[in-house]
Amino acid sequence: MEILYENKTGVRPKLSIILLDWSCRESFHIFKYLSEQTAAREDYEVLWVEYYGARPPDIRQEIDRSLKNGQRPPIDKWIVLDIPKNIYYHKHLMFNVGIIAATGRIVMLCDSDAILRPTFVQSVINAFEKEDGIVVHVDEVRNVDSRFHPFNYPSIDDILGQGCINWKDGLTTGLTDREDPLHTLNYGACMAALKDDMIAVGGADEHIDYLGHICGPYEMTFRLVNAGKREVWLRDEFIYHVWHPGTDGVNNHMGPHDGRNVSTTALSIKRTGRTMPLVENQAIGKLRLKQDDVIYEPLVNQAIPTEVFKDWAVEKFAEKNGLEKRKGILWWVNGFKKHPFVNAWLVATFFKILVKQFHMKLTKFTRKSYSGRELLKKVYRSYDFFKKMGQYNSYTFQRCGVCLKELASENTGSIALYGTGEVAEIIYKMSLCEPVKVSAVFDGFASGSFFDVKVLPFENIRYYNGKILIASLIGVDDKVEALKKIGVSKERIVVL
């Protein structure tokens, strides 16, 4: 590891902005936007952390030019980890190196190819000056039109125009999504919290599940929320991103995810209430335990876990990734081979849900007019849609099965379902093969029956004494709060 440049000002900034590279960045335009902020330059520092060994001449030239002109350089710390190229990149290791090296009271983890408004830094600082016990996210506006590549410094209005996929009525579509914001908000784009709070929860989790493409600061967000912090999304400040080759990752190792590129290991944090990482960085651990009576450079050096590099090697995952690709989307049915009727019923349900999802997508598609080129692109991407939805549905089926087995291991004989949608249907059918049975069903729109169980009004849940399983993967937090408000204890609420 080498620290190529450090600007020691002697003044502690309010905010440290950590930007990552794993020898993939071709444009360093973010430096221009960070140099045009309304916030005082001494209020924020910029750290650039390179995973492999890239030392872009563009960065060195920017530093030299600034120093020659008597200006503060665009970055304050330039750290190159020099990890061997045969080791998969681990963004969470880079996060931790940045957290350790940061001197600001607030630490931000931000996309290093983002476009920023001049008010960006001040908006984040203002959020923490109003309230300390928060973790802040800034959503990302995305434009997929190729006219911005190579990067040509488009205006914000240009980005919000043709090709913009998540902007409506002055907000990102994620901020107005009440149904599934977990997938429509960009949880991985920009996150900030107090440095002390990040260290208190063990920093970013360096578990092998987060190696490669499936990762992000949101796993730390979920643990910070479990530790009592409040999740806040700014509604008057955004970051912006335009298309470039490899935007979504190409030929990357992908850890376990829900089919929509959200880590299932991270999602389990919301279910279990865990606050500490599965694998804590050893240097972060020393900071957390107040064993930091050393200057920061050696502590940064201690952050590199060379002993696990053999487990992060590219060749180690080549065979595994090949097996994953051949596994298919119906791998979860193996657990029901002893019950052929239920097995067939579940497979039929799987494809029924997939067809319904495609129909909804098609209905939305036909509402707009497209050019011939755009139409061909949409048709080409339909395969990708089926693949992603198939993976997402497989995750849903797998979570339902695991949840029922966990309940059975706790000697739970019966449960009530809150909800009557597709997830409830999966759980009911799977329960036919398990010792756990569905004894009651509650819903906000109570009417008729759900298979052989009468659907009761939501308010009647207060009279049910057993465990209540929220039969949904979306809007779960709201449903948990609704149950608590009518007197259901946390111990009786089960989430997938």
Image (cartoon, rainbow, N blue to C red):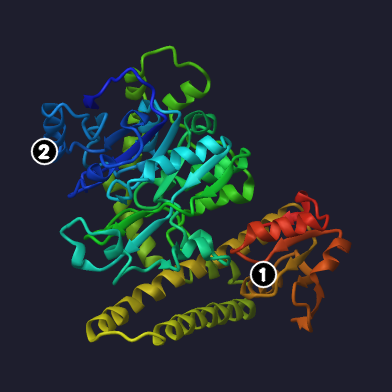
Residue 496 seen: no
Near-viewer residue (490 or 103): 103
Question: Does 450 appear above or below 204?
Answer: below
Residue at x 57%, y 80% (from the top left corner): 349
Q: Position of residue 291 (x, y in %)?
A: 48, 16
Residue nearer the viewer, 173 or 401: 173
Q: What's the CA distance linking mark 1 and mark 2?
A: 56 Å
Residue pointed to by mark 2:
57
Front-most of 192 and 207? Answer: 192
Q: Is residue 337 visible?
A: yes
- The numbered mark, 1 or 2, whose residue comes first in the sequence reads 2
Q: Would residue 438 be found to the left or right of residue 387 on screen?
A: right
Pinpoint residue 178: horizontal percent, then vertical percent: 58, 65
Identify which residue is drawn at 32% across, 37% down.
310
Image quadrant holding the N terminus, namely top left
Which numbered circle lies on residue 277?
none
Task: Identify whether 107 is placed above or below 147.
Answer: above
Where is residue 18 shown, x and y percent of the image? 34, 37
Residue furthest toward the right?
A: 463
Packing grade of label 2 (10 A; few <14, some 14-19, many >=20) is few
Three-letter amino acid code at disc 2? Pro
Element type at mark 2: helix
Kindly state the secondary structure of the residue where label 1 is placed. Answer: helix
The quadrant of the image that shows the C terminus is bottom right
Q: Residues within 10 Å of mark 1 (few under 14, many from 20)?
A: many
